[in-house]
Amino acid sequence: MAGKNTQSSGLDRILTLEIARVTERAAVAAARLRGRGDEKAADQVAVDAMRQELNRLPIDGTVVIGEGERDEAPMLYIGEEVGTKDGAAVDIALDPLEGTTICAKNLPNSLAVIAIAEKGSLLYAPDVYMEKVAIGPGYPAGTVALDATPTDNVHSVAKAKGVDPHEITVCILDRPRHAKLIEEVRATGAAIRLIGDGDVAGVIHTTHPDETGIDLYIGIGGAPEGVLAAAALRCIGGQMEGRLQLNTPEKIARAEKMGIIDPSKIYRMEEMAQGDVLFSATGVTDGNLLAGVKFARDAISTHTIVMRSSSGTVREIKARHQDLTKF
Ligand code: VTB
């Protein structure tokens, strides 16, 4: 649950509005390349735009979840310092274009996302897979768990919601590795929303089941996306667990370098994103919660959700940008 202490945090309240600009800018850049079949180009323009805007923020920031290791990503790599340095020391998790393939195909739910947190409060996750289970707010603690079977998780959510498992919808990434999971969930009677990409959105969608139709997220996706999703849930409320898939000595060694000693540890949402966290996501393509960027002759419209864990405030910002020279 969101805490109440807004005084002790190093994060400035003003940043809650500033952070929206960062994802707005990245989303607009990516949206110009929606449906062009070029994932790399769309990602690159989003990265450039996000970096430019981030460097205007009055923060002393370090990217901890970013575009990759320093040698593989020229910009917004893990360890890159961003911001004007004139402000709080913060850690940053970002994905300028979450769902590059969705954007390239102009399908729903690609996002520009960022989380800014007090230094040392985000899990420094290597770029490996993470097994995840997540639900939105309003359920008793422990309703879902990675140690439980998918069948148990579906039954538990159904029971807590007071419905039959047939009325539960589970979001799962459409991947061959999920064949058994899909079969098991179907056997419970629950419906499945299969998504091509974009499991940050998939997790966030569990927080508004009435609008998105999704109650539960289960499956294996990227670990960086797991930390971003946990940061979002910390702000809105909900429950999530994640377990890194450290199944080779090489991955275990990489994780160790990042301070992860127990390779099979199950991380609760509060361990993946601790302290005060700000989160912002802007829709790139139209989605279940956020509209995509709209281009008109005289203005560009964006739809953003911005939230802060310490106050629990969730803001939706629908912006109409008229100074097109800025984009
Ligand atoms: C997921 C998905 C992301 O990576 O996390 C996925 O939500 C996991 O990797 O949008 P695989 O594609 O290898 O299954 C993304 O697709 C981003 O790359």
Image (spheres, rainbow, N blue to C red):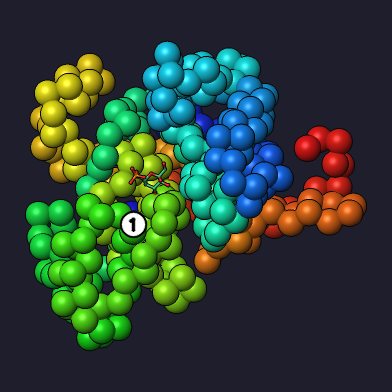
Q: Which of 268/213 is in front?
A: 213
Q: Splitting the image into four quadrants, where does ligand 1 fall?
A: top left
Q: Position of residue 269 (x, y in %)?
A: 28, 47
**Image-quadrant location for residue 250:** top left
Q: How many dots with numbers?
A: 1
Q: Is the residue at mark 1 in contact range of ligand 1, meaning its CB lies under 8 Å from it?
A: yes
Mark 1: amino acid = Leu
Quarter location, residue 108: bottom right
Q: Nearer the viewer, residue 219 or 158?
A: 219
Q: In this view, does 90 lie to the left or right of 206?
A: right
Q: How crowded is mark 1: few (under 14 residues within 10 Å), some or many (20 or more)?
A: many
Quick check: can you spot residue 4? Answer: no
187, above or below 32, in the image: below
Q: Where is residue 302 in the image (x, y as percent from the top left)?
A: 70, 53
Determine whether the residue tagged by mark 1 lies in a helix, strand or loop: strand
Residue in the picture at 54% in, 21% down: 75
Percent position (x, y) of residue 301?
Answer: 75, 54
Q: Is residue 248 visible?
A: yes
Report whether 163 appears left or right of 294. left
Q: Determine the residue located farthest toward the right in the rendered image.
A: 298
Q: At which x and y percent is residue 181?
A: 18, 62
- Picture residue at 11% right of the left edge, 37% below the top: 264
Front residue of 105/23: it is 105
Tell whether 31 sits left or right of 104.
right
Q: Assign the C terminus to one quadrant of the image.
A: top right
Q: Name the residue under label 1.
A: 173
Residue in the image at 69% along x and 54% along y:
293
Q: Toward which corner of the image does residue 316 lie, by quadrant?
A: bottom right
